[in-house]
Image (spheres, coloured by chain):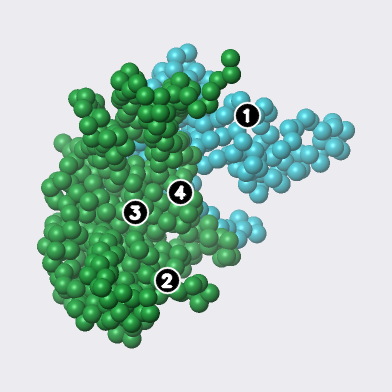
Chain colours: A cyan, B green
């Protein structure tokens, strides 16, 4: 599958690819990517509120206990300290058709001062919504970000649309994200953690210490 | 030695203590505020307190009588209580999830645009502030430091030249809204009604119209006749009675007119979206006949709003969209019929409530408003037509956005087929598209999200509202983004 280049990206933007709003088409569409801007909403960690985060048990209560939402204005500055993680989102709303997938990458100018913008970087065909970014400062100095600055890039790839459905797959209720999303344990993940727990018990490994709500 | 709780010394110390606490409170609140906007209001309060302290110290030096000192100190304590009750709440930091921040820049620009077009001061600091009841409102503090001092201290006392910080806006305006609806975009057109109050305050539209309206003489004579028939009526005080009736009548008329004009500003700015949003709010809060001294019944308000919309778009055949035209037409006929059958007359909805002794005034003011409807609509339109939403917006842009909305695309821009250009969509078109989608095509949106159960549909509706907010923020930034 090939990566889309400038002309194809512009063509697809007119046809079936949605990236909204693009404030500056010529500057944002690069040779083989679209620059994405930092949105205005953030989720920050309340470090003093919680100790261990158990990915197997991320209830809404726990999430709200250790994460807080912030809303900045477009153009407002945000500081990211060394070792700090902030969830953010792209300013642009992305809508992929069923034959395109994408990767979100850091822009090199930010990467070289220690900013990582995303770890879960793959975007599936048919995606609709803003993309959650995991901003992490792995450098030595605080990084000053600005809401609206182009910090990430979206690399688009052609994908062959699936013709068959996953076994037992039913249409599932879903939302269209408009802001960064809290960490959430999906059903598939729950099953995996439950299997691991059973395995641990069978192997006589005992319960690991998990914080209670 | 035991302190005398009645002495001037004691009272003086209490005022100083309270001022000290207030200063501490203001600095604490200021430091906790998230951005420079609300901090300006905190600064204005700090400046106000500095003047009050200055006046207090100089006044205390001039007074010799113990009794007078106590009296003045009590006034100062009462002023500090006034600050705490009426002004300080607006400095409290509110959890950000209850503030529709996406709208703030749009509203600030909108008030600036209105100021420019309708010729009033652009130095307005506009904020949103949530409240706990299901109600919308506006609190404006004009020329805050000087205004508050003049309101609370004798004129001769404010002799010192008050230097207002040049940073300080002429107006601090707080639009208040129900906390529970802070993310409900479909109800946000009601915020524009509050902006309408600001327009009316600044331009004096309702005051100018008040001078033009005619009192339906027959109704007033009937009212006077009723008064005469009362057993306790005293004929020798007829002039006084008549004046009392007129004063009450004028007071209610002014308040109701101001509400109707604010509605008409919102109707002109937002078009049908305001009608739908106000209809929904009035359904949630009262019956169409409920009234108060400050607010006409929502039936009367809806009648005015629809008459305006009908004249703007339907009777002129400017709206081509079938669904929208039909919706407005159906409601127009329904309310017109209700009016003709006397069903919109203000009355207390519950029979359990004791009948309002002032109801005679409300009926009379209601009659006056209907009697003068044409002149009110005409005079208001002359003033505010420069900010009207044109029919093309509803026919082209809104329909484009409606289709995007129900296919899950962010409705922040639209393709103008006439020019082949992509354009930013604004608050008016997004809210109208939102309402049209909500009224006519919500099933498509639910289907898009695979929302089947009741709870899934409720979550989908929240998502729908969030999309509208995101679109308003994005559309505004797109429109303001500097070009080449």
Residue situated in front as seen by the camera: A100 or B105: B105
Q: Which mark is residue B131?
A: 4
Q: Is residue A185 left or right of residue B388?
A: right
Q: Which of the marked residues, 3 or 4, is nearer the chain's N terminus? A: 4
N-terminal-most mark, 2 or 4: 4
Q: Quadrant of the N terminus of chain B?
A: top right
- Pointer 1 chain: A
Depicted B479 relative to depicted B240: above or below: above
Same chain for labels 1 and 3? Say yes or no: no
Q: Which residue is under mark 1?
A: A49
Residue B422: percent from left, percent from top: 22, 51
- Do discs 2 and 3 share a chain? yes
Q: Which residue is mark 3?
A: B191
Q: Which residue is mark 2?
A: B356
Nearer to us of marks 2 and 1 is 2
Gap in angstroms between the C-alphas marked 2 and 3:
30 Å
**Front one among B361 and A31:** B361
Given contact means CB atoms under 8 Å apart, are the residues at marks 1 and 4 in contact? no
Q: Is residue A147 above or below residue B223?
A: above
For numbered disc 2, what is the local secondary structure? loop
Disc 3 with disc 4 on a shared chain: yes
Q: Secondary structure at mark 1?
A: helix
**Mark 2 and mark 1 on one chain:** no
Q: Quadrant of residue A213?
A: top right
Q: Which callout, 2 or 3, points at the residue further toward the start of the chain?
A: 3
Q: Which of label 3 and label 4 is nearer to you? A: 4
Foreground: disc 1 or disc 4: 4
Q: Nearer the viewer, mark 2 or mark 4?
A: 2
């Amino acid at each position: 599958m090939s990566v889309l280049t400038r002309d194809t990206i512009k063509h697809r933007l007119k046809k079936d690819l949605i990236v909204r709003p693009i404030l500056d088409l010529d500057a944002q569409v690069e040779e083989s990517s679209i620059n994405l801007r930092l949105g205005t909403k953030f989720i920050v960690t309340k470090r003093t509120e919680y100790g261990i985060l158990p990915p197997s048990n991320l209830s809404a209560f726990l999430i709200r206990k250790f994460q807080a939402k912030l809303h900045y204005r477009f153009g407002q500055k945000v500081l990211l300290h060394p070792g700090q993680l902030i969830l953010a989102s792209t300013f642009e709303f992305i809508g992929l058709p069923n034959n395109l997938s994408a990767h979100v990458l850091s822009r090199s100018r930010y990467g070289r001062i220690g900013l990582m913008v995303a770890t879960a970087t793959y975007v599936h065909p048919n995606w609709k919504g803003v993309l959650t970014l995991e901003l992490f400062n792995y450098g030595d100095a605080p990084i000053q970000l600005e809401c609206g600055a182009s910090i990430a890039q979206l690399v688009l790839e052609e994908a062959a649309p699936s013709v068959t459905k996953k076994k037992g797959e039913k249409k599932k209720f879903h939302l269209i994200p408009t802001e960064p999303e809290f960490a959430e344990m999906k059903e598939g993940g729950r099953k995996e953690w439950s299997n691991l727990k059973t395995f641990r018990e069978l192997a006589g490994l005992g319960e690991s210490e998990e914080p209670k709500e | 030695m035991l302190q005398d709780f009645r002495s001037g010394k004691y009272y003086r110390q209490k005022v100083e203590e309270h001022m000290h606490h207030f200063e501490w409170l203001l600095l604490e609140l200021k430091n906790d505020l998230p951005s420079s906007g609300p901090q300006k209001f905190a600064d204005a309060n700090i400046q106000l307190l500095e003047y009050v302290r200055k006046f207090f110290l100089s006044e205390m030096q001039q007074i010799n009588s113990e009794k007078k000192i106590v009296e003045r100190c009590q006034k100062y304590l009462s002023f500090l209580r006034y600050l705490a009750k009426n002004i300080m709440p607006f400095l409290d930091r509110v959890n950000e999830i209850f503030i529709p921040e996406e709208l703030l820049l749009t509203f600030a620009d909108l008030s600036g645009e209105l100021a420019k077009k309708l010729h009033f001061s652009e130095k307005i600091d506009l904020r949103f502030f949530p409240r706990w009841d299901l109600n919308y409102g506006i609190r404006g503090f004009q020329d805050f430091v000087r205004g508050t001092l003049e309101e609370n201290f004798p004129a001769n006392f404010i002799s010192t030249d008050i230097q207002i910080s040049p940073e300080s806006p002429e107006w601090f305006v707080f639009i208040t809204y129900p906390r529970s609806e802070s993310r409900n975009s479909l109800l946000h057109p009601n915020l524009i009604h509050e902006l309408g109050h600001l327009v009316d305050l600044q331009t004096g539209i309702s005051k100018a119209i008040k001078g033009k309206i005619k009192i339906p003489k027959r109704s007033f004579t009937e009212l006077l006749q009723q008064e005469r028939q009362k057993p306790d009526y005293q004929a020798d005080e007829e002039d006084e009675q008549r004046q009392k009736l007129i004063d009450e009548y004028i007071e209610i008329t002014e308040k109701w007119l101001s509400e109707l004009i604010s509605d008409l500003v919102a109707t002109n700015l937002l078009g049908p979206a305001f009608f739908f949003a106000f209809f929904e709010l009035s359904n949630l809060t009262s019956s169409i006949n409920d009234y108060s001294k400050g607010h006409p019944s929502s039936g009367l308000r809806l009648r005015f709003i629809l008459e305006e919309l009908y004249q703007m778009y339907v009777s002129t055949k400017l709206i081509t969209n079938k669904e929208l035209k039909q919706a407005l037409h159906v409601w127009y006929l329904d309310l017109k019929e209700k009016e003709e059958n006397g069903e919109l007359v203000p009355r207390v909805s519950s029979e359990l409530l004791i009948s309002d002794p002032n109801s005679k005034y409300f009926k009379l003011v209601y009659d006056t408003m209907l009697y003068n409807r044409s002149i009110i609509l005409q005079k208001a339109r002359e003033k505010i037509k420069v900010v009207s939403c044109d029919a093309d917006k509803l026919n082209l842009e809104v329909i484009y956005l409606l289709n995007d909305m129900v296919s899950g695309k962010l409705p922040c821009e639209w393709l103008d087929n006439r020019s082949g250009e992509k354009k930013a969509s604004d608050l008016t078109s997004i809210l109208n598209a939102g309402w049209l989608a909500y009224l006519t095509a919500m099933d498509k949106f639910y289907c898009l999200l695979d929302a089947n159960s009741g709870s899934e549909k409720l979550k989908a509706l929240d998502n729908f509202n969030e999309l509208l907010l995101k679109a308003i923020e994005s559309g505004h930034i797109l429109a303001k983004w500097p070009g080449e």
